[in-house]
């Protein structure tokens, strides 16, 4: 059977951070890989590290820059087909751009599901990955990606196996320590430049547990053979991630520690019950 995998992501760079290893691995195995990116990422960082709330941040300029970065990352990951739905980034929950009628968040689910549905009907993927109902961490565009994926699947004449990306609780503990360290360093660097930034409460995913209990992980993919490509794909998004710990630690250290990606089964037409290391378990 010809295998097709499809990932639905919210912004340029999400494909690399949560499925970069999986995409490259599947491409190496000869699986057709389709990447759907819902928004243009207008509310990412602008050139010079300007944050979306800073003066001089030009959302359209950011989108243009990120377009090239996504092309580069998709090439590195061997993506067979890249589809941009072209919606406008909604920004973080509670931001004014949420209300922009062009934003992904303001777009009716049924309308965006039409656009995604065309791609699903053309590609007929056996396996789809997106985010859970809280968008993994509460970002409106990630929540909307979840909603349109579920709605588009409902319209198919078959049921694909759907997975949500996940981080096991044991790994999340390590990440949280790292994020706290990054935040501390960022504040120090800002303070050295005389910049005082208020902590934005909208950026804190309140009441959302991003960790999945280890025993509830359904698929744990060994990406160690392609971790270098994952690093390169992340690095391609240099305007967003270039200064992050992930990139700053260097390729070798990244490869040494980035050995897995994890997924939880959300639609299970094959009735699978065992945990697996292959996201196409049951199909080959
Ligand atoms: Zn995102």
Image: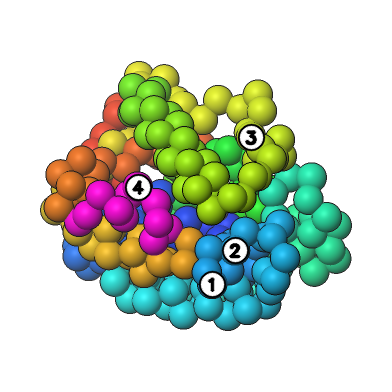
Residue where numbered disc 2 is placed: 50
Q: Position of residue 211 (x, y in %)?
A: 46, 27
Q: Earlier in the sequence, mark 1 or mark 4?
A: 1
Residue where numbered disc 1 is placed: 47
Residue 210 in sight in this render: yes
Residue where numbered disc 4 is placed: 245
Q: Nearer the viewer, mark 1 or mark 3?
A: 1
For disc 3, the neighbor class at 10 Å (few under 14, some 14 to 19, many from 20) is few
Residue where numbered disc 3 is placed: 204
Q: Is residue 234 above or below residue 64?
A: above
Image quarter hosting the N terminus: bottom left
Give the structural element (helix, strand or loop) at label 2: loop
For disc 4, the neighbor class at 10 Å (few under 14, some 14 to 19, many from 20) is some
Q: Residue at x 30, y 29 (%)?
A: 275
Residue 159 in sight in this render: no
Q: Confirm whether the magenta stretch covers residue 78.
A: no
Q: Which residues are magenta?
A: 241-251
Q: Position of residue 54 (x, y in %)?
A: 69, 60
């Amino acid at each position: 059977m010809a295998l097709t995998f499809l990932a639905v992501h919210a912004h340029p760079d999400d494909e690399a951070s949560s499925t970069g290893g999986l995409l490259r691995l599947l491409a190496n195995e000869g699986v057709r890989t389709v990447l759907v990116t819902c928004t243009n990422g207008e509310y990412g960082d602008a050139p010079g590290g300007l944050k979306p709330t800073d003066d001089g941040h030009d959302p359209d300029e950011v989108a243009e820059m990120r377009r090239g970065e996504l092309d580069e990352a998709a090439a590195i990951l061997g993506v067979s087909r890249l589809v941009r739905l072209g919606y406008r980034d909604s920004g973080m929950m509670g931001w004014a751009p949420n209300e922009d009628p062009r934003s992904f968040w303001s777009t009716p689910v049924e309308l965006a599901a039409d656009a995604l549905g065309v791609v699903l009907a053309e590609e007929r993927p056996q396996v789809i990955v997106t985010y859970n109902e809280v968008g993994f961490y509460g970002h409106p565009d990630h929540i909307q990606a979840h909603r349109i994926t579920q709605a588009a699947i409902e319209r198919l004449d078959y049921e694909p196996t759907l997975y949500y990306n996940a981080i096991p609780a044991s790994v999340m503990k390590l990440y949280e320590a790292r994020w706290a360290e990054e935040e501390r360093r960022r504040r120090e660097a800002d303070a050295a430049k005389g910049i005082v930034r208020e902590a934005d409460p909208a950026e804190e995913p309140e009441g959302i547990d991003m960790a999945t209990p280890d025993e509830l992980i359904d698929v744990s993919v060994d990406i160690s053979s392609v971790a270098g490509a994952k690093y390169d794909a992340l690095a391609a998004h240099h305007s967003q991630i270039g200064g992050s710990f992930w990139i700053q630690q260097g390729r070798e250290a990244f490869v040494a520690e980035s050995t897995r990606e994890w997924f939880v089964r959300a639609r299970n037409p094959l009735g699978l019950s065992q945990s697996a290391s292959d996201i196409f378990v049951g199909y080959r």
